[in-house]
Image (cartoon, rainbow, N blue to C red):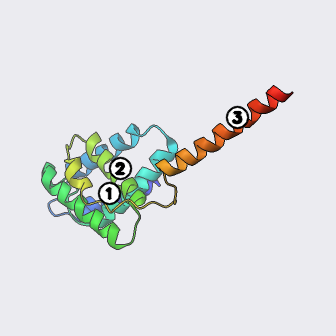
Amino acid sequence: MVNQLKYLLVKHILTINNTDDIAITEMMDCIKLFESSLASKETRKSYMLLLKKYLEFVAKEDIFFKSNARLIEQKIIEFILHLKQQGKSYAAIRMYLAAVKSFYKINDIVLNDSKISKFLPEQKRVRKDRGYDYKAISMNSSKVYSGISNMANLDKRG
């Protein structure tokens, strides 16, 4: 998986105009830095896969956009909108976003998280759980109180 991503990155860089050996080396160093920053084997595997999907989306563009954070943010927002159009869930998009933001963060690119987060889809409840309202609490507490009273009366008789 990691080797596939490295291959994709090298291929990606070669398709960008004016690419030289220095740019390829720098990109490989960025990937190695990102990869080594991920402690868990499972996190490494999933983040590398998610980052690969982002790089496929970016296609032939320079993924660092000449270190312009605003352009990077715009591309991430476009990626979020693309994932929403594909019907990806809130949780899935958050996973993609975590991998992409971690990649840029470890490579010293500061992004505006609050701006990017505004484009996430609405978080929908999968489960139908709900909190207790006042009526349910008072009804349950009266049952508990009557049960305790009954137990106390049995003790007095016994």
The spot of residue 16 in percent (x, y) is 20, 63
Mark 2 neighbour class, 10 Å CA radius: few under 14, some 14 to 19, many 20 or more = some
The spot of residue 135 in percent (x, y) is 50, 51
Q: Is residue 89 above or below residue 152?
A: below
Q: Which residue is mark 1?
A: 9
Q: Which residue is mark 2?
A: 98
Between label 3 and label 1, give the one nearer the viewer: 3
Identify the residue at horizontal 30%, vertical 43% (top origin): 29
Q: Is residue 24 above or below residue 151?
A: below
Question: Which mark, by number, is residue 149?
Answer: 3
**Residue type highlighted by circle 2:** Ala
Q: Is residue 11 above or below residue 139?
A: below
The earlier-in-sequence mark between 3 and 1 is 1
Mark 1 neighbour class, 10 Å CA radius: few under 14, some 14 to 19, many 20 or more = many
Residue furthest out toward the right: 158
CA distance for labels 3 and 2 = 54 Å
Residue furthest out toward the front: 157
Q: Which element type, helix, strand or loop, lies under badge 2?
A: helix
* Nearer-the-camera pick, 56 or 132: 132
Identify the residue at horizontal 80%, vertical 26% (top origin): 156
* Nearer-the-camera pick, 101 or 131: 131
Q: Is residue 101 visible?
A: yes
Looking at the figure, which quarter contains the C terminus? top right
Q: Which element type, helix, strand or loop, lies under badge 3?
A: helix
CA distance for labels 1 and 2 = 19 Å
Q: Is residue 2 visible?
A: no
CA distance for labels 3 and 1 = 72 Å
Q: Look at the numbered discs 3 and 2 and tell me whether their residues touch, using CB distance below 8 Å.
A: no
**Residue type highlighted by circle 1:** Leu
The earlier-in-sequence mark between 1 and 2 is 1
The spot of residue 119 in percent (x, y) is 25, 60
Identify the residue at horizontal 30%, vertical 59% (top origin): 120
